[in-house]
Amino acid sequence: MSEKKGNDHAGHRHRMRKRFIEHGFEGFEQHQILEMVLYYAIPRKDTNLLAHQMLKRYGSFAGVCDTPIDVLQDDFGLSESAAVLLKMLPALAGVYADSKHKVKSIDKQSVIPLFRSKFIGANSEKVALALSDAKDKLIFCDVIFNGSFSAAELSVRTIADYALRHNARYAYLAHNHPSELFAPSKDDLRATNVISRTLDNLGIMLVDHIIFTSTEHFSMRSNEVYAKVFVR
């Protein structure tokens, strides 16, 4: 790289960083954001063309971040560090959202952003559980199962153990549908019913079961057709 070209490259990165410092990502195109992210893993290469190529291959910024590490490496020769950095972005967004919306007490509405933060960037099904005491104080909220929700029926004891261990009075369940179809399946209904009855026998109320897609959510308790799976 010639001295002039090197100076132009460094100057471009400096201008991009300055623009971000002053305005955030306002007005940035997706390829410019991806280009900037790659600065921190590929310090001496023009990442503009690479960003364009990756977006063309994977369709969107989210598509890039959701691509497995080994595929990113094979398709574009990325180092492990660069591929891991891209995979960290949705996970970091989830941590940020979780800490941003941290609340001391929960109800059917305030639990939604807490749950959504658990599914940011998830491309496989996960099950999350939130627990509160008799005064609605949040005492637990996290992913407890990786896999289809219907399979969680086999782990009812695990859900009950969490609730008993935290001396919970109320429980909220959530899982995501990577298919983007948020309507509950027959297996979802059956498993919810089993979990609701099991917890009720322990003196714990299952308040709601919420299904998330990447953009929407569906409360089973709030729908009269599905509310019947709850004991009370």
Image (spheres, rainbow, N blue to C red):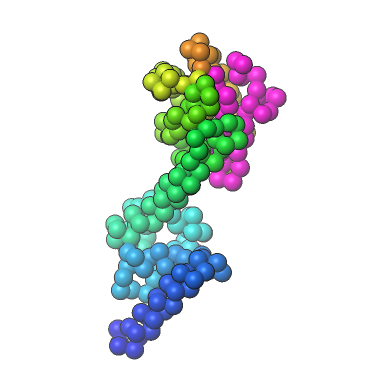
Q: Is residue 19 above or below residue 84?
A: below
Q: Position of residue 183 (x, y in %)?
A: 62, 33
Is 80 on the left or on the right of 168, as rendered?
left
Q: Is residue 218 above or below residue 13?
A: above
Provide the residue span drawn in magenta.
205-232
Q: Position of residue 158 (x, y in %)?
A: 40, 21
Residue placed furthest toward the right: 224
Q: Is residue 194 above or below residue 18?
A: above
Q: Nearer the viewer, residue 103 or 150?
A: 103
Q: Position of residue 33 (x, y in %)?
A: 47, 65
Q: Position of residue 53 (x, y in %)?
A: 45, 67
Q: Quadrant of residue 2?
A: bottom left
Q: Quadrant of residue 210?
A: top right
Q: Is residue 2 above or below residue 160?
A: below
Q: Nearer the viewer, residue 99 or 40?
A: 99
Q: Nearer the viewer, residue 109 or 76?
A: 109
| Residue 223 visible somewhere in the drawing | yes
Q: Residue at x 39, y 81 (%)?
A: 11
Q: Quadrant of residue 99?
A: top left
| Residue 177 visible somewhere in the drawing | no
Residue 63 in the magenta stretch? The answer is: no
Is 196 on the left or on the right of 143, as rendered?
right
